[in-house]
Amino acid sequence: MNSAAVLMAESLYDRYMQAAAAHRAHGETCTRCSPDARCDTGRRLHESFTRLQDAYLRWQKQQRT
């Protein structure tokens, strides 16, 4: 793996983890969010988290092939 790929993976992983932390923190304090329904902010944070998670998992899979 070249250094550019490593930097991209670290950056993507960092953004994925930051999105997960923001989503978790919001869920701990928002009284309108639940596992089945989210407020506008909760929905945006969840979408960001899942999009970054999917991108990171795709990147990992590509590295194994």
Image (tube, rainbow, N blue to C red):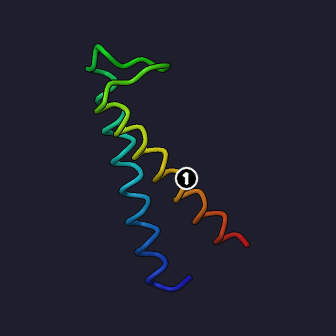
> Residue 23's image quarter?
top left
Query: What is the crowding at mark 1: few (fewer than 14 residues within 10 Å), some, or many (at least 20)?
Result: few
Residue at image coords 65%, 70%: 62
Q: Is residue 11 above or below residue 19?
A: below
What kind of element bears circle 1? helix
> Residue 39's image quarter?
top left
Residue at image coords 73%, 73%: 65
Task: Say which quadrant the N terminus sits in.
Answer: bottom right
**For this rendering, which residue is in front, 44 or 18?**
44
Q: Is residue 55 above or below residue 27?
A: below
Q: Position of residue 47 (x, y in %)?
A: 43, 42
Horizontal relation, residue 8 to residue 45: left or right: right
Q: Position of residue 10 (x, y in %)?
A: 41, 66
Residue at image coords 50%, 50%: 53
Q: Is residue 39 above or below residue 13?
A: above
Amino acid type of the residue that numbered disc 1 sits on in the rendered structure = Asp
**How many marks can you see?**
1
Residue annotated with mark 1: 54
Horizontal relation, residue 35 to residue 31: left or right: right
Q: Position of residue 12 (x, y in %)?
A: 42, 62
**For this rendering, which residue is in front, 32 or 29?**
32
Q: Residue furthest right?
A: 65
Q: Is residue 37 above or below residue 48?
A: above
Q: Residue furthest bottom?
A: 2
Residue at image coords 39%, 41%: 20
Q: Position of residue 58 (x, y in %)?
A: 60, 61
